Image (cartoon, rainbow, N blue to C red):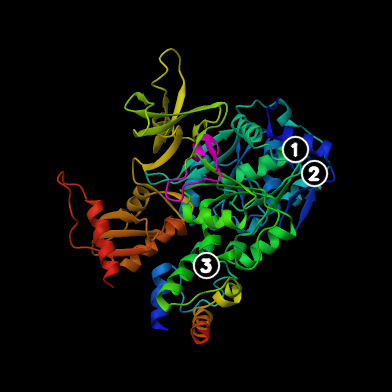
């Protein structure tokens, strides 16, 4: 989880990933942030994030993102 | 002959009153409904202000209401200044101080993002409540009257307000239509925010062809599956997007399952299109027409275009092509025109497309819109883009910047503005900004006792999110060039080494 926070913070230093739970619903994360995060996650965790996984529910909080990574790693 | 953009609206309202003109996720309005709203609200604004050619701020939220507000202000003989209430308060204040608005239009009068003082604040509901009578000032306007002022990053530390008149927008519309021949009732999928001049094409080209402006909310671009669904549901056939929006689709490999099935025209501008992104789109949409567009806000959207053929060399840069009709685009080196292939020059523009200048900034206006050195018999303003170009096989190619302006996340940013803002923070002695193009990261280095978090907080008060550095690093000394300036190239190399080493 620390690694994830580090990656997220690196992408968007101005966002409080530790506490926000409506990153998408409140419009905190913008589309280019998502692109940056998805590309970093794919690289750092060696996962493929499918277009069907790109839904608001998977990106509303760091926990949700973490759960997505774990699921994708298990599926591999 | 058109002198005013409301001409287009009136024409469409007569020829296709029942056609949907504007739609977003929540609402849709026909040309007749738009015309009725605009003529009521426009008269109310005219009566309320009692003056013409005054700035009216619109607090935008990317909905049909924004466009109704723009048309109503134009109808009233005044000009609009779109402001995104989500920008930092300090930046909004700078814009307001520059334009000194005569009124504000908003959906929510309790949430004006600056102290309005004695300036009237109106909603569309209030403005359309009265009877549709009173003056119709647009009828007696002239085509050099302003239509809008839009702000862009300025290296002097405050954003510059680019002032565009009706003639320039009408010229853009007519030239686009003469070159591209958009069919009647085309459906334009609008991506660009309304404080960004890419959106001007969507709004007014759609009016020109009696088309429909389908406003695509920001969130769709984070989740391409939803975006594609929407494009197909609403049968969007034309998109004129900023390059980063197309990059989002390709980097998320969004066409894995479904594709936009109705797209006929895919046009893009704002920054250099990576060949890989283009290849991804073309493979998905082999029958669509792809067009690269080039031009800064100061020349009203675009001054050159390149319709991309099938034999695009994947390793060659995508040309910005040639000038639109009724506009001259040429290269200058010193005071001389560059005509030979391969030689670098600054891209310069003359014609009706030129902005009238930077609002209330005669100093900056004079510098950027200087006399054309190739014309020594009469005054002729010429816009110096600051972009470098050269000819290859007769086509113009973009070759980067002559200064430290960058394109990042689709926005035009003066790194000097970020530096100035950082230099103004307590505990910062000197700050220097560099851009890591490969990773699309803004890096800020500084000398001083300030903590990076503190410095970020200071920057957040003044700069929009897209201008915030991705990394802020304290340094104990700056590498210097032989002339004693900060060596930005070394700084960038140093930063890149650090990232690769962990």
Residue B394, quarter of picture: top left
Instruction: Say whether mark 1 and mark 3 are on the same chain.
Output: no
* Residue bearing the label numbered 3: A29
| Label at residue B236 | none
Viewer-nearest residue: B201 or B106 = B201
Q: Are marks 3 and 1 in contact (CB under 8 Å)?
A: no
Q: CA distance from mark 2 to mark 1?
A: 8 Å
Quadrant of the rendering where the C terminus of chain B is positioned: bottom left
| Label at residue B9 | 1
* Residue bearing the label numbered 2: B31
Q: Residues within 10 Å of mark 1 (few under 14, many from 20)?
A: many
- Whether residue A42 is in magenta: the answer is no
Where is residue B126? Give x, y as percent.
Answer: 75, 50
Residue B302 appearing in the image: no
Q: The numbered mark 1 sits on a residue in which chain?
A: B
Q: Residues within 10 Å of mark 3 (few under 14, many from 20)?
A: some
Q: The numbered mark 2 sits on a residue in which chain?
A: B
Q: CA distance from mark 3 to mark 1?
A: 36 Å
Where is residue B246? Give x, y as percent.
Answer: 55, 55
Q: Main secondary structure of the magenta part?
A: loop
Vertical comparison of B358 with A11: above or below? above
Q: CA distance from mark 2 to mark 3?
A: 35 Å
Q: Are marks 2 and 1 in contact (CB under 8 Å)?
A: yes
Q: Which residues are magenta?
A: B296-318
Q: Residues within 10 Å of mark 2 (few under 14, many from 20)?
A: many
Quadrant of the rendering where the N terminus of chain B is positioned: top right
């Amino acid at each position: 989880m620390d690694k994830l926070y580090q990656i997220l913070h690196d992408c968007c230093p101005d966002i409080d990933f530790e506490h926000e739970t409506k990153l998408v619903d409140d419009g905190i994360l913008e589309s280019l942030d998502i692109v940056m995060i998805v590309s970093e996650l794919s690289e750092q965790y060696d996962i493929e994030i499918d277009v069907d996984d790109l839904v608001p529910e998977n990106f509303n909080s760091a926990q949700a993102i973490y759960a997505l990574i774990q699921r994708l790693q298990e599926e591999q | 002959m058109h002198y005013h953009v409301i001409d287009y609206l009136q024409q469409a309202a007569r020829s296709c009153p029942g056609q949907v003109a504007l739609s977003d996720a929540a609402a849709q309005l026909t040309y007749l409904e738009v015309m009725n709203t605009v003529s009521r609200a426009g008269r109310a604004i005219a009566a309320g202000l009692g003056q013409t050619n005054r700035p009216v701020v619109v607090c935008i939220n990317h909905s049909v209401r924004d466009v109704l507000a723009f048309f109503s202000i134009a109808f009233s003989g005044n000009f609009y200044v779109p402001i995104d209430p989500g920008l930092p308060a300090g930046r909004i204040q700078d814009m307001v101080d520059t334009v000194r608005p005569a009124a504000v239009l908003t959906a929510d009068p309790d949430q004006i993002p600056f102290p309005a003082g004695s300036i009237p604040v109106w909603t569309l509901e209030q403005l359309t409540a009265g009877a549709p009578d009173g003056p119709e000032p647009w009828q007696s306007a002239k085509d050099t009257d302003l239509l809008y002022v839009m702000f862009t990053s300025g290296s002097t530390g405050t954003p510059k307000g680019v002032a565009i008149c009706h003639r320039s927008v009408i010229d853009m519309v007519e030239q686009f239509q003469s070159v591209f021949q958009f069919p009647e009732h085309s459906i334009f999928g609008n991506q660009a925010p309304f404080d960004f001049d890419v959106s001007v094409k969507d709004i007014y080209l759609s009016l020109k062809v009696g088309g429909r402006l389908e406003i695509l909310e920001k969130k769709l671009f984070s989740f391409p599956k939803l975006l594609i669904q929407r494009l197909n549901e609403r049968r969007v056939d034309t998109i004129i997007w900023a390059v980063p929006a197309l990059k989002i689709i390709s980097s998320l490999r969004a066409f894995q399952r479904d594709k936009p099935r109705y797209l006929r025209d895919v046009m893009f501008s704002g920054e250099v299109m990576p060949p890989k992104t283009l290849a991804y789109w073309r493979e998905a949409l082999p029958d669509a027409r792809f067009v690269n567009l080039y031009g800064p806000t100061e020349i009203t959207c675009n001054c050159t275009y390149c319709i991309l053929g099938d034999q695009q060399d994947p390793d060659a840069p995508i040309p910005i092509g040639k000038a639109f009709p009724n506009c001259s685009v040429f290269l200058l080196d010193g005071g001389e025109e560059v005509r030979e292939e391969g030689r670098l020059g600054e891209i310069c523009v003359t014609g009706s497309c030129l902005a009238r200048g930077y609002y209330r900034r005669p100093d900056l206006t004079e510098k950027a819109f200087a006399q054309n050195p190739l014309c020594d018999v009469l005054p002729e303003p010429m816009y110096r883009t600051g972009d470098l170009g050269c000819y290859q096989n007769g086509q113009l190619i973009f070759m980067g910047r002559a200064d430290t302006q960058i394109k990042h996340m689709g926005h035009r940013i003066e790194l000097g503005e970020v530096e100035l803002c950082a230099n103004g923070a307590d505990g910062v002695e000197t700050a220097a900004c560099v851009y890591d193009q490969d990773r699309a990261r803004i890096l800020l280095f500084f000398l001083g006792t300030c903590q990076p978090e503190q410095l970020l907080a200071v920057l957040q008060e003044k700069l929009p999110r897209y201008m915030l550095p991705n990394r802020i690093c304290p340094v104990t000394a700056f590498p210097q060039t032989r002339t004693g300036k900060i060596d930005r190239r070394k700084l960038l190399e140093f930063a890149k080494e650090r990232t690769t080493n962990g």
